[in-house]
Image: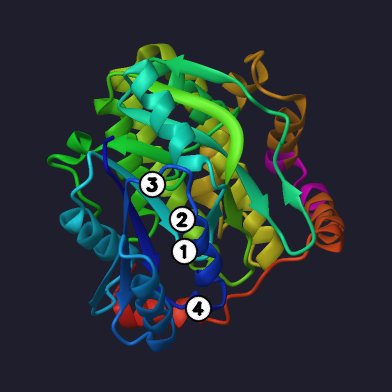
């Protein structure tokens, strides 16, 4: 049986870490090594990892100076010995069958990457389709089209199992946020094929103060997405319309985020609005684009005041029915201390 190395970044997630590691210790597939990379100044997470490593010898604990998620993931990759690699964030957790389902799907399809469905996990509810159970073997362009149209998985690093050889010559760019998007895209481009099991078995915890939700992350994600889409347009011309849609959609999301934070103005968001304007005609004539997105694009350009009211109203309604977790960490300060931009 091939060994699967699971890399867990454990930093300022002590209130959730036991559930995370417990879900990995009880996986139905036993041939694992669980590599926990812990910030040396995080005594609470280190204590939990050390305690559980005495219970389960498959857990290896590496303590290092915290220099951001990218550096920690590189440390985990350098230490991994498995034939396959998976990533689980320290505040998330997995279904007990997740690794087995991903591995067996990869082996059956002879795929370099195996993707599993995910649930967004709130205090009071979960968002994901528990009845979804479709397994598809995809070419690289087919997988990228799913990502661009957001009809399944995305460029997240954590809902996938990778053949180790894909990482030859690929590491995370240290000192940057949203670094996982670039790496995931490069890995998908290298893959012979991708197998996707839509059954939700990865549980992504929705925390209102997690490191992924700092204010400028969406802008940085948008800049990363534009770079990735430019490469897609050159490499896969058949994805041109999908890439144009995705850039416009992400631009609209940045505008709405500015509205939520109260910083929106035509001057403040001029560059982002330019992207919406550039691809608005493409959106209108693309039959794969939802009508709601076309309406948002129109309001964004011509009636931003109406879009702001609708955005605030929708957010208020969403928060009334979804309760977020909290990590208790000041991620803006942590990123600044670690030199992560």
Q: Circle 4 is placed at which residue position?
A: 14
Q: Label 4, label 2: how many angstroms apart (C-alpha)?
A: 16 Å
Label 2 – label 3 distance at C-alpha: 10 Å
| Image depth: mark 4 or mark 3 in front | 3
Q: Quadrant of residue 135?
A: top right
Query: Is the residue under label 1 in contact with that under label 2 (CB below 8 Å)?
Result: yes
- Sort mark 1 into few (<14), some (14-19) or many (20+) by Cα contacts within 10 Å: many
Foreground: disc 1 or disc 3: 3
Q: Residue at x 20, y 49 (%)?
A: 171
Q: Residue at left 63%, top 60%?
A: 206
**Residue at the (29%, 77%) spot, across then down:** 66
Q: Secondary structure at mark 1?
A: helix
Q: Which mark is residue 21?
A: 1
Query: Earlier along the polypeptide chain: callout 1 or callout 3?
Result: 1
In this orientation, which residue lies closer to the viewer: 311 or 166? 166
Q: Classify residue 181 as left or right of residue 256.
A: left
Left or right: 243 in relation to 341: right
User: What colour scheme does the image use?
Assistant: rainbow
Over which residues does the magenta segment extend? 300-308
Residue contact between numbered discs 2 and 3, judged by CB atoms under 8 Å: no
Q: Residue furthest left?
A: 169
The residue to which callout 2 is attached is 24
Q: Earlier in the sequence, mark 2 or mark 3?
A: 2
Question: Where residue 126 appears, x then y in whole percent?
Answer: 73, 50
Residue 285 is left or right of residue 37, and the answer is right
User: Which of 242 and 266 lies nearest the eye of the viewer?
Assistant: 242
């Amino acid at each position: 049986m091939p060994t699967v190395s699971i890399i867990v970044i454990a930093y300022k997630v002590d209130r959730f870490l036991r559930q995370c590691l417990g879900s990995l210790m009880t996986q139905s597939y036993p041939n694992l090594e669980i590599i926990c990379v812990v910030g040396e100044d995080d005594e609470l997470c280190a204590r939990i990892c050390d305690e559980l490593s005495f219970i389960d010898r498959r857990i290896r604990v590496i303590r290092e100076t915290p220099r951001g998620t990218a550096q920690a993931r590189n440390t985990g990759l350098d230490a991994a010995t498995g034939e396959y690699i998976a990533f689980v964030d320290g505040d998330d957790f997995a279904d007990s069958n997740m690794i087995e389902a991903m591995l067996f799907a990869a082996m059956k399809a002879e795929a370099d990457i195996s993707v599993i469905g995910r649930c967004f996990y709130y205090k009071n509810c979960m968002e994901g389709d528990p009845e979804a159970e479709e397994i598809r073997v995809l070419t690289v362009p087919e997988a990228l089209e799913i990502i661009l149209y957001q009809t399944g998985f995305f460029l997240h690093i954590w809902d996938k199992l990778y053949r180790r050889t894909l990482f030859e010559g690929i590491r995370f760019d240290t000192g940057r946020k949203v670094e996982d998007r670039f790496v995931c895209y490069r890995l998908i481009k290298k893959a012979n094929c991708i197998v996707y099991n839509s059954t939700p078995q990865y549980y992504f915890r929705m925390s209102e103060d997690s490191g992924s939700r700092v204010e400028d992350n969406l802008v940085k994600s948008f800049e990363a997405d534009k770079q990735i889409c430019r490469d897609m347009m050159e490499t896969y011309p058949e994805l041109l319309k999908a890439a144009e849609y995705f850039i416009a959609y992400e631009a609209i999301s940045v505008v709405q985020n500015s509205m939520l934070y109260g910083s929106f103005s035509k001057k403040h968001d001029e560059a982002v609005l330019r992207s919406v304007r550039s691809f608005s005609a493409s959106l209108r004539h693309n039959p794969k684009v939802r009508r709601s997105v076309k309406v948002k694009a129109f309001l964004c350009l011509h009636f931003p005041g109406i879009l702001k009211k609708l955005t605030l109203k929708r957010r208020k309604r969403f928060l009334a029915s979804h309760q977020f977790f909290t990590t208790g960490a000041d991620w803006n300060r942590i990123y600044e201390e670690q030199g992560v931009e």
